[in-house]
Image (cartoon, rainbow, N blue to C red):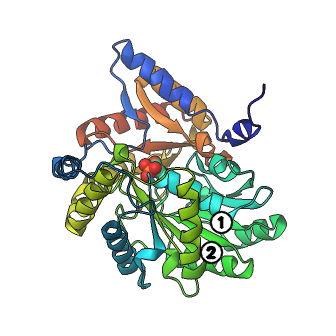
């Protein structure tokens, strides 16, 4: 008896960042004080008011099967939100509610790619991306970006990859995990042009769209001619610290949403109604609450910029959004992996090696801004001193 080949096929191609995480957890279990700047989970817990809305909904009886594409009121709220953010009129029929952004990424690729098709994704990348594309039998091809260009995708590189592979989809993420960069208008216009020239579907992962520190978040869906070929992925995991609730969405053309509905009938069969009611309540709290939730990461981004300013050993990639900063430590002569292992062993600070997000981030570290300010500042000062001591 054999397992399906797709299980092996799904395995990622980033380095083994988990090794750091597991080692750090072992050290903590053995009583050592480790500062964890590894995982991308808000350090705040879900607002009790959201939990109260969830409780009231469940106690009120919303515990049965729900509308599989999502409750009407929530689809309408998401349509209004994405419509307002992109300037593209959006109807509830263009929205499907999913159990989180990850399930949305999976469903989007399942709906658009047949086995043997090619899906592109930008590297460095969120580690699930290649496996998500491959799960349905498609080929996943990374399109690298360069630290010298602040990891912004370059249209010529994308175009060459699309032409060479005959790809059908392109997956992007802005604000970006792991780099903390925000794609500017020029970058997005370049991507839009490639999508049109090469007839690509664009899957736009915007789960960090409330965490923007400079300028404004711009969705590719807002660019001319793009709404008809773009699926926007959203989630309340980061904006409302609702990682455990598993609630997200896809917004796209109605015929794609209809296909996604069929997929949901055969997979998730919808998202719990009480979670959807809590999500509706959360979204109705408005932009001020979202800005308040994002504020700690902005403050900590500023702390990181201040503590690491002027270092010859640690150079920050310009961080403009999301809850991470990416640091270039190539001047120390160590790989990101070697640096992260030594930092953990010698300074008891856990960070993710750049290599775990693909070779494009080799010689870098991803630092999650998910510890309170004082702890983060002290850890970064030690990281800087550690790196500088390694300089030749
Ligand atoms: N996309 C990116 C870039 C992420 O960083 C994450 C989570 O860390 C997700 C998607 C998935 O988020 P969730 O499934 O919790 O909505």
| Residue 76, picture quadrant | bottom left
Relative to 379, residue 90 above or below: below
Which of the two residues, 84 or 2, is positioned nearer the viewer here? 2
Relative to 151, residue 13 above or below: above
Q: Is residue 325 visible?
A: no
Disc 2 target residue: 191
Q: Residues within 10 Å of mark 1 (few under 14, many from 20)?
A: many
Residue 143 position within the rendered picture, expressed as x and y whole percent measured from the top left: 70, 59
Disc 1 target residue: 170
Query: In the image, is 364 to the left or to the right of 385?
Result: right
Which of the two residues, 347 or 288, is positioned nearer the viewer here? 288
Question: Which residue shows up at 16% across the image and 51% down it?
Answer: 49
Relative to 348, residue 220 above or below: below
Question: Which residue shows up at 44% across the image and 24% down it?
Answer: 24
Residues at circles 1 and 2 in contact by the CB criterion of under 8 Å: yes
Q: Residue furthest bottom?
A: 224
Quarter the C terminus occupies: top right
Disc number lying in front (1 or 2):
1
Secondary structure category for the residue under label 2: helix
Query: In the image, is 200 to the left or to the right of 269?
Result: right
Query: In the image, is 65 to the left or to the right of 55?
Result: right
Q: CA distance from mark 1 to mark 2?
A: 9 Å
Residue 94 position within the rendered picture, expressed as x and y whole percent measured from the top left: 47, 75
Question: Sequence-wise, which precedes: disc 1 or disc 2?
Answer: 1
Secondary structure category for the residue under label 1: strand
Relative to 189, residue 39 above or below: above
Quarter the N terminus occupies: top right
Q: Is residue 160 visible?
A: yes
Query: In the image, is 100 to the left or to the right of 230?
Result: left
Residue 14 position within the rendered picture, expressed as x and y whole percent measured from the top left: 64, 41
């Amino acid at each position: 008896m054999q397992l399906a080949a797709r299980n092996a096929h799904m395995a990622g191609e980033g380095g083994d960042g988990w090794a750091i995480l597991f080692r750090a957890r072992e050290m903590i279990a053995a009583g050592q004080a480790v500062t964890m700047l590894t995982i991308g989970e808000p350090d705040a817990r879900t607002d009790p008011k959201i939990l109260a809305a969830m409780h009231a909904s469940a106690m009120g009886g919303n515990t049965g099967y729900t509308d599989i594409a999502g409750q009407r009121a929530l689809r309408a709220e998401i349509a209004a939100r994405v419509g307002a953010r992109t300037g593209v009129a959006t109807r509830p029929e263009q929205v499907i509610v999913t159990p989180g952004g990850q399930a949305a990424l999976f469903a989007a690729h399942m709906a658009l790619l047949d086995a043997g098709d090619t899906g592109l994704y930008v590297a460095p990348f969120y580690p699930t991306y290649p496996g998500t594309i491959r799960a349905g039998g498609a080929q996943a091809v990374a399109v690298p970006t360069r630290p010298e260009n602040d990891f912004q995708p370059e249209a010529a590189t994308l175009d060459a990859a699309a032409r060479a592979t005959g790809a059908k989809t392109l997956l992007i993420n802005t604000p970006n995990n792991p780099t903390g960069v925000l794609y500017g208008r020029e970058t997005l216009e370049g991507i839009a042009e490639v999508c049109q020239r090469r007839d690509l579907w664009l899957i736009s992962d915007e789960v960090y769209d409330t965490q923007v520190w400079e300028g404004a978040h711009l969705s590719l869906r807002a660019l001319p001619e793009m709404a008809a070929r773009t699926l926007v992925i959203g989630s309340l995991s980061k904006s409302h610290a609702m990682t455990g609730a598993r609630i997200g969405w896809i917004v796209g053309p109605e015929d794609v949403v209809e296909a996604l509905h069929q997929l949901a009938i055969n997979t998730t069969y919808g998202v719990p109604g009480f979670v959807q009611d809590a999500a509706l309540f959360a979204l109705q709290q408005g932009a001020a609450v979202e800005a308040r939730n994002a504020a700690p990461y902005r403050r900590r981004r500023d702390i990181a910029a201040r503590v690491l300013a002027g270092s010859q050993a640690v150079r920050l990639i310009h961080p403009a959004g999301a809850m991470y900063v990416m640091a270039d430590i190539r001047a120390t002569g160590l790989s990101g992996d070697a640096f992260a292992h030594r930092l953990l062993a010698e300074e008891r600070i856990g960070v993710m090696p750049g290599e775990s997000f693909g070779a494009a981030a080799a010689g870098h570290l991803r630092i999650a801004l998910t510890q309170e300010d004082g702890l983060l500042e002290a850890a970064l000062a030690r990281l800087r001193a550690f790196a500088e001591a390694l300089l030749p």
